[in-house]
Amino acid sequence: MSTTSAPQDGGSQGAVRQRQTKLTWRQRRGQWDVKYSPYLYIAPFFIVFGITGLFPILYTAYISLQDWDLVRNTGEFIGFDQFAWVLQDREFWIALRNTFSIFLLSSVPQLVAATFIAAMLDANLRAKTFWRMGVLLPYVVAPVAVALIFSNMFGDKFGLINTVLGDLGIDPILWHTDIIPSHFAIATMVNFRWTGYNALILLAAMQAIPRDLYEAAAIDGARTVRRFFSITIPQIRPTMIFVIITATIGGLQIFDEPRMYDAFGLGGANRQWLTITMYLYNTGWGDFNFGRAAAVAWLLFLIIISITLLNNFLTRKFVADDATAVKKVKKQALKGSAKGGK
């Protein structure tokens, strides 16, 4: 057997080589097109990212290790002294506290409201396009305009909110003096702008859910609330994780709203609403210490990467749970068919 198979293999390989050598120029060009075209199509993105994204990150890391002289546009290498100075600065930790406080006050209610609005828009409403476009209008408004309007609404003495509270017999709230009220006011601006945007993303995910699942659940007697938590939420879980990740990155980089919350843009008299990005801006363009500002930028970058990795871990866990659920359903279906066959 071995003496007859060897010549056949050799003959087949020789035939393949012969066919490959007979490829025409057009066929070769077609093979190259299939192999290399995807790399050419995505290359412009990575080239632009390398110029506008990767190079500034690396150059910022270089400056963060220098005692940078803005006039001479050069610096003296001092190692990690800038990082040590920033980590010992009390304002940095106040800014970090404010950033996480505003992030939690804005992200959690925002995601809950966006999910509820998306579920309402997914229902059988009249003039669907009007309502769906309407929730996106706050996102179109310039953040500076939103900050100016809301900062006046939350004014300590003559603001609309305190006027209404006074008519109801409630003492006025010091929105620009106390810490938590100022965070709540800034979080309200963020929620106003981004809730509709996230609602449309979640609505797109809800629209992709097969309607057969809802009809089968309705036939089995499941009510609207049960169908929402048993079908809608599990089906949109990957999209919701994406929304959570983007909201996390945006929340930790918040700048426009707290910067425009008062006329000075310093985060309050006692830095009540000073955020990390404002601290970075004040260090770089207020104190003209770009080496220290670069160190703050890298610390913020590491914080965002850490939380993004945490979200990525949660995402993988949720996706694995979905796959496990599918496997269980398949196993149950196989067991059911086996019992039916017996």
Image (spheres, rainbow, N blue to C red):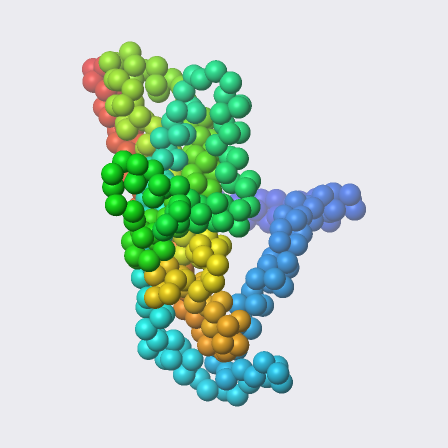
Q: Is residue 294 among what the camera can see?
A: no
Which residue is found at the position 45% from the left and 57% from the top?
Answer: 262
Which residue is nearer to you in this view: 141 or 114? 141
Q: Is residue 151 among what the camera can see?
A: yes
Which residue is nearer to you in this view: 305 or 44? 305
Q: Is residue 196 left or right of residue 180?
A: right
Which residue is nearer to you in this view: 317 or 186? 186
In this rendering, is residue 231 above or below 29?
A: above
In this rendering, is residue 315 above or below 200?
A: below
Q: Quadrant of the C terminus?
A: top left
Q: Position of residue 307 (x, y in %)?
A: 36, 57
In this rendering, is residue 105 above or below 91?
A: above
Q: Position of residue 43 (x, y in %)?
A: 64, 54
**Number of on-image labels:** 0
Tell me where residue 341 sits by quadrant: top left
Tell me where residue 160 sits by quadrant: top left
Which residue is found at the position 33% from the left and 49% from the top?
Answer: 184
Q: Is residue 140 left or right of residue 150?
A: right
Q: Position of residue 266 (x, y in %)?
A: 44, 64
Give the farthest residue toward the right: 25
Which residue is found at the position 47% from the left and 72% from the top?
Answer: 283
Which residue is found at the position 38% from the left and 27% from the top?
Answer: 119
